[in-house]
Image (tube, rainbow, N blue to C red):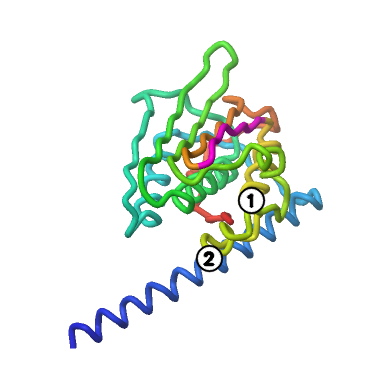
Amino acid sequence: MLAANELKLGMLAHIRTKSDHLFRLLSDLMMVSGINAGKTSLKIGFVRVTDLVEILTSLIERLRQEKDIRVVYDVPATLPTMETDGLRLEQILSNLVTNAVKFTEQGQITIRIRYASPQDTMIFEVTDTGIGIPSKELPFIFDEFHQVDGSVSRVHGGMGLGLAVVKKLVDLLQGEITVVSQPGQGSTFTVTLPLRLQVGTPQSQEFPPLMQAVG
């Protein structure tokens, strides 16, 4: 009876994983379509970095089950409050974290957040010790439907939209994203955003729920 129950739980977990994957693919398609059509609006509010860290921690813990991955946070105890679109920022970081877990079987994922005073920007870094990206592929990783390698996509899934979504959202938030990577050694994605997004008048709001638009 115990073995049968464990089998049922395993099947339910598998179904949930597949359902989540399909939801994320559909979310990616809708997001890219909306941005390309100029139909994606921004809602500016006050965003606490501590809220972001809590959300990312919960996401990583769920995603890294059955993987030998250590997570390190390099986040100062006090950081200024941002004025930006909290939902879009959450989507950016969630996509990057999800990719880091997806392509890392063992090792470490490091999340660094820091404030650059002279430029008045917030810098987010997601570093992993995963499979890395060949240098010849780096110029194209933010292209829609681009997959680094067929064998990799078959193993890890996805349609090549996750990073395209990230790049488009970073552009919407008037920031920039860079990547440094070596095959077999991992990758570091760095997102630099203005502390205060100059679009309309910011209004205080609760941090929005996670949409999980990842690929």
- What type is the residue that disc 1 sits on? Val
Q: Name the residue under label 1.
A: 148
Give yes or no for residue 186 being in the magenta stretch. no
Tag on residue 21?
2
Element under disc 1: loop
Q: In which quarter of the image is residue 214?
A: bottom right
Q: Which residue is drawn at 37% across and 40% down?
A: 108
Q: Which residue is drawn at 57% across and 43% down?
A: 92
Q: Is 106 or 31 nearer to us in this picture? A: 106
In the rendered view, does 142 fall on the left or right side of 212? right
Where's the N terminus, which quadrant? bottom left
Image coordinates for residue 47, horizontal then vertical, percent: 50, 35
Report the span colored magenta.
Answer: 175-183
In the rendered view, does 70 fall on the left or right side of 63? left
User: Residue lying farthest left?
Assistant: 2
In the rendered view, does 31 fall on the left or right side of 68? right
What type of secondary structure mainly makes up the magenta span? strand
Mark 2 to mark 1 CA distance (whole Å): 19 Å
